[in-house]
Image (spheres, rainbow, N blue to C red):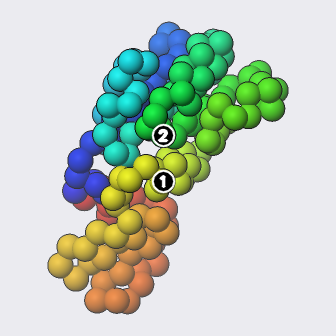
């Protein structure tokens, strides 16, 4: 099933040859995001729920430029910087250019929570609650219940249930 049936466009900018950028793209595809190339002229055409995910690895200058252009666009597109440890010092200098950041290496639950948080303000109806028969799953809180009785699931069990 996968939570959310429609794919959400995501822009990736960065050095594609960097391992962290490739891993990030694979992670986003696994979460059912449509990974699209970043095009400045089309920022304002992105559908509701779009996010700009910018990997700084080897491309901090490109991330800064892209973020500046996104900020000038009439439509607000949330920006998540995925930051390598050497680039952490740049966060203070460029504070207004991103809405949130994620430090590499990142744990999957943190990545998911940050993406969900950014999507909430985009007009994306999201995937807050999914109901299938007697089963109800709340993606925002990672809780599941059957007939209103909560299930005690680990994170991995919840993700497996969500996937099925």
Residue 142 vs residue 93, the one in the foreground: 93
> In x, y percent, where is residue 89?
82, 26
Query: Which mark, by number, is residue 121?
Result: 1
**Viewer-proximal residue, 155 or 88?**
88
Residue 38 location, quadrant: top left
Sequence-wise first label, 2 or 1: 2
Task: Name the residue: 63% across, 35% down.
Answer: 98
CB under 8 Å between callouts 2 and 1?
yes
Q: Is residue 2 visible?
A: yes
Image quarter in which the C terminus is found? bottom left
SS for callout 1? loop
CA distance for labels 2 and 1: 9 Å
Q: Quadrant of the N terminus?
A: bottom left
Which image quadrant is residue 61 in?
top right
Q: Say what secondary structure mark 2 lies in.
A: loop
Res. 76 mark: 2
Residue appearing at x 53%, y 22% in the figure: 69
The answer to whether one can see residue 35 in this image is no
User: At 23% from the left edge and 52% from the top edge, which residue is drawn?
Assistant: 5
Q: In screen coordinates, is 37 left or right of 109?
A: left
User: How many numbered callouts?
Assistant: 2
Q: Is residue 163 above or below residue 79?
A: below
| Residue that extends furthest to the left in the rendered view of this protein | 133
């Amino acid at each position: 099933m996968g939570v959310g049936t429609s794919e959400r466009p995501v822009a990736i900018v960065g050095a594609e040859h960097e391992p962290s950028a490739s891993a990030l793209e694979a992670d986003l595809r696994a979460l059912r995001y449509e990974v699209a190339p970043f095009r400045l002229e089309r920022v304002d055409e992105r559908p509701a729920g779009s996010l700009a995910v910018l990997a700084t690895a080897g491309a901090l200058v490109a991330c800064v430029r892209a973020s500046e252009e996104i900020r000038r666009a009439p439509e607000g597109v949330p920006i998540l910087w995925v930051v390598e440890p050497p680039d952490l010092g740049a966060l203070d200098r460029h504070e207004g250019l991103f809405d949130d950041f994620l430090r590499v290496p990142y744990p999957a639950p943190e990545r998911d929570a940050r993406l969900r948080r950014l999507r909430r303000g985009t007009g994306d109806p999201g995937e807050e609650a999914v109901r299938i028969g007697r089963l109800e799953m709340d993606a925002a809180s990672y809780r599941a219940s059957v007939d209103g009785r909560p299930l005690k699931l680990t994170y991995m069990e919840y993700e497996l249930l969500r996937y099925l």
